[in-house]
Structure formats: structure tokens, C-alpha cells
């Protein structure tokens, strides 16, 4: 998601509303300007956090990670000579 701040005029917001919303949905934050002055900021709405019972159920279904298996996997992808 882009965090760059770009500007859109009130006129463009009115005339090109759909494309402005598409940009916001794509992750852009847009400052709305009137007569060259910032008047509002439009940004994507954060996705609501998962409920704790959903997170606990996901956690319970995770496979058990054995320390030896983890070490073997890490050794396979990390160059120890660095």
C-alpha cells in the first residue's frame, strides 16, 4: 500500500469521483484541495481486526513447530559463512 500523499481538487473529486475512490481503495492517501489549500484527507478505511475467538481458533490449528526442525530449515536457507 502506498503511503505517499497526493492532492486532488474538489472539482476533480466531484467530476472524477469513481477514479478517486479507486485510487483510495488501491491504498493511496489523497489530500483534497480547494483554491490550492488543503481541506480534507481521504484514506482507505482500515480492515477491522479479527475477533479474538477467530484468532484463537486459527492459533489452535497451527502445526506444532519443533525446534530441531526449525533449526534444520533455517540452516538450509541461511549462509552461515556470512
Image: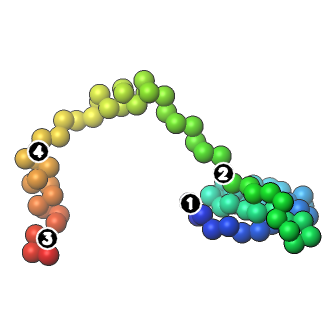
Where in the figure is residue 55, as x and y percent of width and height? 40, 31
Residue identified by numbered label 2: 44
Marked residue nearer the N-terminal end (3 or 2): 2
Cα separation between marks 1 and 4: 34 Å
Based on the displayed image, in which of its 4 quarters is residue 34 positioned? bottom right
Where in the figure is residue 67, as x and y percent of width and height? 11, 45
Give the answer, above or below, for where 73 lies relative to 8: above
Q: Quadrant of the C terminus?
A: bottom left
Cα separation between marks 3 and 2: 40 Å
Residue identified by numbered label 4: 67
Cα separation between marks 1 and 2: 10 Å
Marked residue nearer the N-terminal end (2 or 4): 2
Where in the figure is residue 79, as x and y percent of width and height? 14, 70
The kind of secondary structure element at disc 3 is loop
Q: Are marks 1 and 2 in contact (CB under 8 Å)?
A: yes
Residues packed near mark 4 inside 10 Å, few (<14), some (14 to 19) or many (20 plus): few
Whether residue 35 sits left or right of residue 20 in the image: it is: right
Q: Quadrant of the N terminus?
A: bottom right
The kind of secondary structure element at disc 2 is loop
Residues packed near mark 3 inside 10 Å, few (<14), some (14 to 19) or many (20 plus): few
Q: Are marks 4 and 3 in contact (CB under 8 Å)?
A: no
Cα separation between marks 1 and 3: 31 Å
Label drawn at residue 1: 1
Residue identified by numbered label 3: 79
Amino acid at each position: 500500500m502506498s503511503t505517499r500523499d497526493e492532492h486532488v481538487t474538489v472539482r476533480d473529486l466531484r467530476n472524477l469521483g469513481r477514479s478517486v475512490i479507486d485510487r483510495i481503495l488501491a491504498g493511496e492517501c489523497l489530500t483534497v484541495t480547494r483554491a490550492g489549500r488543503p481541506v480534507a484527507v481521504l484514506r482507505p478505511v482500515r480492515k477491522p481486526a479479527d475477533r479474538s475467538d477467530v484468532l484463537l481458533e486459527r492459533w489452535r490449528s497451527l502445526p506444532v513447530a519443533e525446534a530441531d526442525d526449525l533449526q534444520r530449515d533455517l540452516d538450509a536457507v541461511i549462509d552461515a559463512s556470512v
